[in-house]
Image (cartoon, helix red, strand yellow):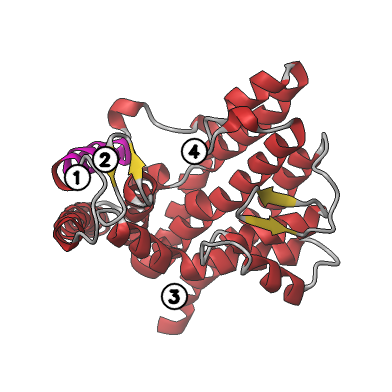
Amino acid sequence: MQTGVVLALALLVALAIDRRWGEPSVRWHPVVWMGRALQKAGDATAPTEPTGVDMVSFWRAALCWCVLAVIAVVIAGALQYAVLRYAPWWLGFILLGALLKPMLAWRMLRSESLAVESALAHSLQDGQAQLARLVSRDVTVLSEVQVRESAIESLAENLNDSVVAPIFWFLVAGLPGAVLYRFANTADAMWGYPGMRGGRYWQWAGKWAARADDVLSWIPARITAAALWLVTKGVSWSALASNARATPSPNSGWPMAAMALALNVRLSKPGVYVLNADGDDAAAGDLLRADTFATRAVFCVVVLAVLCLVSLLVVRV
């Protein structure tokens, strides 16, 4: 069977595994392994105190990033080659789907996001505690409306990071592409912070990781926004693009702006940005609506990805 069809079936298997079982255990999760390797490398490269311009830390961290990325990609490539070369097609797409699944986290993202609203039904403090599982900002100063805003933002941003971008890079480069993206995104989450974090100074040591994630997320973030724009009615693309540029990130603003406009709610990070400034306050029920829009967007992206992969067979024929 043609590789494109096997990859398409593998993607569907990965999503089916995610829907049925969610995340693998921490012990067997490749992203956890990436995180542990990055933790050790970060401890060896990032200084413990603030510095001025520090190109030594920059290049040392960049080299570590590249070495770890190559290791991850080579392992993924070897596994994909072995599956496609030696396994029968009916077993190959199942094995490849199982290998791809840890790069996707759609079920967990939905569960953690919707749990914020359930927690808020008990108390603001419970909502803040649940939100802290999703974001790095100080949640203790957030109001009920701001907790909902942050949860919606996290759902929209991670819709790209945890679902659309891995699918995009799987479409482009197979399992090695999805693994490379997941590694880069994990590195950015751990290293890509200006200033102090976790007892380390990342202003220079984290720049390569942050920029690498920006580059790899550039196209997928806009695909995510386009998918949300497609499944909602009445959202202006020009308004979406204008709002997306209001955030410091070159990418996260796109899916967040699309979601803000789709829900007609105001999303903001105090002192940093405001999206859809004329929108309503995020209310009970808006997280569920956001989940509905995100689910439709994922469906569109998956259908498009499968069609692209299957079309490889048509082109060859």
The amino acid pointed to by label 1 is: Pro
Which residue is under mark 4?
A: 136
**Residue at the disc numbered 2:** 200
Q: Amino acid at mark 2?
A: Arg
Q: Quadrant of the N terminus?
A: bottom left
Residue 313 circle label: 3
Q: Are marks 2 and 1 in contact (CB under 8 Å)?
A: yes
Residue mark closest to the camera, 4 vs 3: 4
Amino acid type, residue under disc 3 in the picture: Leu
Q: Does residue 36 show up magenta in the picture?
A: yes
Distance from Cα at disc 1 to Cα at disc 3: 51 Å
At 74% across and 77% down in the image, what residue appears? Answer: 238
Dot 4 falls on a residue whose secondary structure is: loop
Q: How many marks?
A: 4
- Considering depth in this image, is 59 or 181 the residue closer to the camera? 59
Q: Residue at x 13, y 42 (%)?
A: 44
